[in-house]
Image: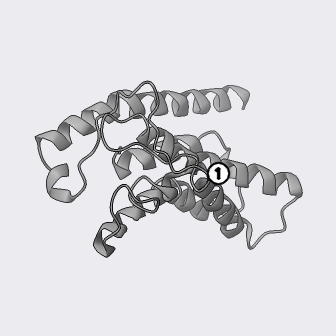
Amino acid sequence: MPTFITHMVVGASAATLIHPRSLPSRVRFYLLTLLCPILPDLDVIGFSFGIPYHHPFGHRGFFHSWFFALIIGIAAGILYLRKTQPTPKQIFRITAYFVAISSTHGLLDAMTDGGLGIALFSPFDNQRYFLPIRPIKVSPIGLSGFLSYRGAQVILSEMLWVWTPCLALAAGAVLIRRRKS
């Protein structure tokens, strides 16, 4: 899996695609934007309860699926818009945004070079999948593994394959916005 930092980088760069001044609560928007892409990794708690990795509710199982991303996105949309009176178009846009950034988690994990794969279609299909291109080094689980030589290799891999494209996307969005102003 990519690190939680990388999942947050994806969310933060996606936030640049939406003009923040047009949003009713920027703080809530940014908090949800950073939280949605990392929520699926809370499934590692299952190890403490004896849920094995390969179980449908094990790590990279149901909670990494697109169905769960849909649930996260709808919940985030409701949380974000709860104090407003949004139009149907606003409801759709913000919910689609949160679903999209939540969906990136499983896709990024499916691009790693380790593990059992991702149950992208769970609960309908619990088979684990990888994408054909897997350039991202899989992150160790736990702080000690992360703070090692292997952890440094993972961060460098993520910087190359995820952070750089995300920062380019964010910079492009900012430049386009400035040209229009």
Number of dots carrying numbers:
1
> Measuring 41% from the left and 60% from the top, which residue is drawn there?
55
Residue 60: image location, x then y, percent: 42, 52
> Measuring 41% from the left and 58% from the top, which residue is drawn there?
41
Decide if residue 58 is on the left or right side of residue 84: left
Q: Residue 173 falls in which quadrant of the image?
A: top right
Decide if residue 120 is on the left or right side of residue 145: right
Decide if residue 65 is on the left or right side of residue 136: right
Q: Is residue 150 above or below residue 60?
A: above
> Measuring 49% from the left and 46% from the top, which residue is drawn there?
127
Q: Is residue 9 above or below residue 79?
A: above
Say if residue 22 shows up in the picture: no
The secondary element bearing badge 1 is classed as helix
Crowding near the residue tagged with mark 1, few <14, some 14–19, many ≥20 C-alpha atoms within 10 Å: many
Residue 78: image location, x then y, percent: 71, 67
> Measuring 45% from the left and 39% from the top, which residue is drawn there?
108
Residue 25: image location, x then y, percent: 66, 63
Q: Give whichever of 179, 47 is nearer the camera.
A: 47
Which residue corresponds to mark 1? Answer: 99
| Quadrant, the N terminus | top left
